C-alpha cells in the first residue's frame, strides 16, 4: 500500500477576501502562516507541490527542510475574467451569473473549463503516484489547491461524491491509500482513510 497526503495550501489575502485566486501568484498572509502553527501532518518520504508560491510556502512550513518536487500541472485553475475578484465585485457580470446558473459547469470566460482543469489535475496525480510506485516510495504529500483536490477525488476516490463534496478549507486535506497491485492494473482508485482539518 502507498499513502498519499493531499493538502490544500494555507490562507492568502485573496482567500480572506473570498476572491477567485487561480493564476494570481500571491504569497501566504499572516493568517495563513498562523493557521499552520501547531498543526501536525503525516510524515512522508517525498514532497510534491504546485508551482504556485502559496503552495511552496505552505509546504516549507509543514515540512521544513524537505526537498520539493514541483508538478506544473498541479497549478490552480485559470479563472479567466473572474480572476482576483469576489462574488460582490462580479454581481453585475452577466458571464458570472451564467456560470452560477450552470452550477459551475460552464468554462470560465477567457479561462479554463472545469473539465479541462480536472483532466489536467487528475493526469498529474496519476503520474505522481506512478513515480512513487516506480521508486518504492510508500508515503508522499502533495501541497496543492482546493480545486486540484476536488478534481482528483471526484475522479479517483472509491467513495463517490460530486466535485464540491470534496471541498476542504485552507490547510486541510485528505490521507489516501492506494493499492499498488490495482493501480498497476490500471485501476486508478484511491481510498480516503482520513480527512485533515
Image (cartoon, rainbow, N blue to C red):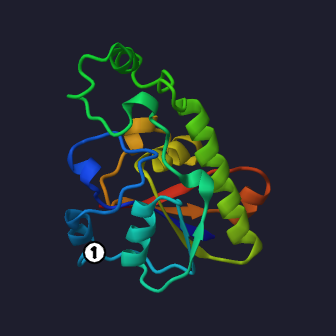
Residue 171, above or below 24: below
Q: Classify residue 99 as left or right of residue 68.
A: left
Image quarter hosting the N terminus: bottom right
**Location of residue 162 (image quadrant):** top left
Q: Position of residue 153 (x, y in %)?
A: 51, 47
**Location of residue 47 (image quadrant):** bottom right
**Location of residue 12 (image quadrant):** bottom left
Q: Is residue 158 visible?
A: no
Q: Classify residue 6 as left or right of residue 164.
A: right
Q: Which residue is mark 1?
A: 39
Q: How many marks?
A: 1
Most extreme residue toward the right is 185
Question: Within 10 Å of the Cα at label 1, are there few (<14), some (14-19), or many (20+) other Cα atoms?
Answer: few
Q: Residue at x 34, y 51 (%)?
A: 168
Q: Position of residue 81 (x, y in %)?
A: 41, 29
Image quarter hosting the C terminus: bottom left
Q: Secondary structure at mark 1?
A: loop
Residue 52, above or below 151: below
Q: Residue at x 28, y 74 (%)?
A: 39
Query: Which sits in the foreground, 178 or 28?
Result: 28
Q: Is residue 167 visible?
A: yes
Residue 66, above or below 147: below
Q: Residue at x 47, y 23 (%)?
A: 109
Q: Residue at x 67, y 54 (%)?
A: 126
Q: Position of residue 175 (x, y in %)?
A: 46, 64
Amino acid at each position: 500500500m502507498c499513502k498519499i497526503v493531499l493538502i490544500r495550501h494555507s490562507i492568502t489575502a485573496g482567500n480572506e477576501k473570498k476572491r477567485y485566486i487561480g493564476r494570481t501568484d500571491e504569497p501566504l498572509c499572516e493568517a495563513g502562516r498562523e493557521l499552520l502553527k501547531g498543526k501536525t501532518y503525516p510524515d512522508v518520504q517525498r514532497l510534491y507541490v504546485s508551482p504556485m508560491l502559496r503552495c511552496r510556502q505552505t509546504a516549507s512550513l509543514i515540512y521544513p527542510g524537505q526537498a520539493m518536487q514541483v508538478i506544473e500541472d498541479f497549478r490552480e485553475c485559470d479563472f479567466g475574467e473572474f480572476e482576483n475578484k469576489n462574488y460582490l465585485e462580479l454581481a453585475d457580470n452577466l458571464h458570472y451569473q451564467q456560470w452560477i446558473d450552470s452550477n459551475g459547469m460552464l468554462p470560465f470566460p477567457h479561462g479554463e473549463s472545469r473539465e479541462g482543469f480536472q483532466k489536467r489535475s487528475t493526469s498529474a496525480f496519476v503520474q505522481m503516484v506512478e513515480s512513487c510506485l516506480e521508486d518504492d516510495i510508500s508515503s508522499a504529500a502533495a501541497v496543492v489547491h482546493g480545486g486540484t483536490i476536488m478534481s482528483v477525488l471526484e475522479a479517483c476516490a472509491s467513495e463517490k461524491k460530486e466535485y464540491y463534496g470534496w471541498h476542504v478549507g485552507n490547510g486541510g486535506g485528505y490521507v489516501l491509500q492506494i493499492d499498488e497491485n490495482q493501480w498497476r492494473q490500471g485501476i486508478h482508485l484511491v481510498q480516503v482513510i482520513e480527512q485533515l482539518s
